[in-house]
Image (cartoon, rainbow, N blue to C red):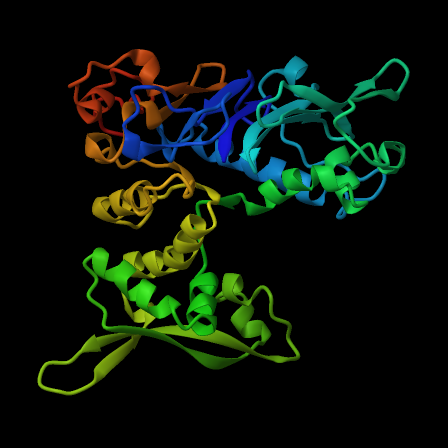
Amino acid sequence: MLVSFEVENWTCFRDQQHFSMRATKGTPEEFAFDTGVSHYPRLNRASVIFGPNGSGKSRFVDALAFAQQLVLSSALQSQEGDAIDVQSFLYDTEISMKASGFRFVFIENEIAYEYSFAVDSERVTEERLDVRPPGGRRQNWFSREYESDSATYTWKFGVGLRGSRGVWRKATRENALFVSTAVQLNAASLRPIVRWFRRLVVVRSGGFTTTFTSTSLQDNPGFKARLVRFFRQLDIHVSDIRVREKDLYVDESGRHIIPRMLKDFDNSKRKTMLVPEFGLPVKGKKGLAFLDLDQLSDGTQRIYAFAGPWLDIVDRNRVVVVDELDRSLHPHLVWFLIRFIHDCYTTTEHRAQIIATVHDTHLLEDALDRRQVWLTEKNLDQSAMLTPLATYKPRKNESLRRGYLGGRYGAVPNVAEMEAIA
């Protein structure tokens, strides 16, 4: 469960930006769930981010992806002296020389973790972990801070972090996170942190591929019925969905035509790919006619790619972050995907969350509560801001869609009047 995320000095976000999934007393019951953690009692199931093109929506998703990758791989995929691919704010020379900061608050197994770090291109400059055990007070488990004058780190450890702390500290490189390194060395008490980041799903604007859905369809006999029901709820009346294996021979001529599909294949070996097929009834004939997925609309193909991961996200209580959720999808399908997170499961055991960047303002009509809406906007100095819509205190019966499109909350493009362009 994600409580909040903060980012500072990352691409267009110069100043610290705070994003929160915390629900308020006024949030409708179906839009939030109880956490079982007294300090963070209720969280939103969904939040969406609106804003004009180039206002920072995708950069917000990139920040989450970068931080996740650093936690999962900094101890494994880099060597001493390797640069960290951090992207600081470019339009202020003083700021661009400073470290980029990230802070997560999340809940795993009824324990609240407050984990933060800052990095520049050379090293981790700060890292800190605070923990709130069930019914207990906040505890600092460790902190590290780079002192540029002495070119050394100052380390502090709390009693809550048990294990070979000295060994973990000595093994931690400047360009690696302590949490990542310690977990590689069997730090059991820190594993829930890495586990939470591993279960976080960050989807860039390209969306999901069809692989997960197809593999689930092939490996899980009960998945087909769920997938057919999923499509029928979307008014796509398919009678059967199956996959067949197709031999694929890779050569150089094919690589540039479909590089995304072939990127994991090598030249010399024959590989197999899964081809989804949709079965539809034929009037006056028994049986079904099957069409390959690529014969269907772009929207249907994208829904198929979403379906498997979406069911898995809900089943496993994952947090998913999706850039451009509404790309190539009808507004009703976008509404369905969000409400699926809201309505599919109503018990407290199911706590999946979605964060999505969108342009589709129809979602402001009835799919979301105003406390679930965030806005991005750029200033004249190219720095971006992330603001909750609730800051503008819209009236209870106010049309959020009309207010947003009318510019009442900002975060819309300032399009000039039409004129001839020579």
207, 168: nearer the viewer? 168
| Left or right of residue 406: residue 138 | right
Quarter of the rendering containing residue 280? bottom left
Q: Point out residue 177 in the picture as x, y percentages from the top left corner.
A: 75, 34
Q: Point out residue 201 in the picture as x, y percentages from the top left corner.
A: 51, 45
Given the current orientation, which residue lies at the most extreme left position?
Answer: 284
Q: Residue at x 29, y 56 (%)?
A: 299
Vertical comparison of 170 with 217: above or below: above
Vertical comparison of 61 with 147: above or below: below
Vertical comparison of 331 with 285: above or below: above
Quarter of the rendering containing residue 309? bottom left
Q: Point out residue 19 in the picture as x, y percentages from the top left corner.
A: 47, 24
Q: How many numbered discs sit on the rendered protein?
A: 0
191, 251: nearer the viewer? 191
Quarter of the rendering containing residue 407? top left
- Is residue 148 something one can see in this rendering? yes
| Left or right of residue 42: residue 103 | right
Q: Residue at x 36, y 75 (%)?
A: 242
- Is residue 422 something one can see in this rendering? no
Q: Residue at x 50, y 65 (%)?
A: 261
Vertical comparison of 191 with 364: above or below: below
| Left or right of residue 16: residue 228 | left
Q: Residue at x 60, y 46 (%)?
A: 198
Quarter placement of the C terminus: top left
Q: Point out residue 417 in the picture as x, y percentages from the top left corner.
A: 22, 22
344, 420: nearer the viewer? 344
| Left or right of residue 89: residue 258 | left
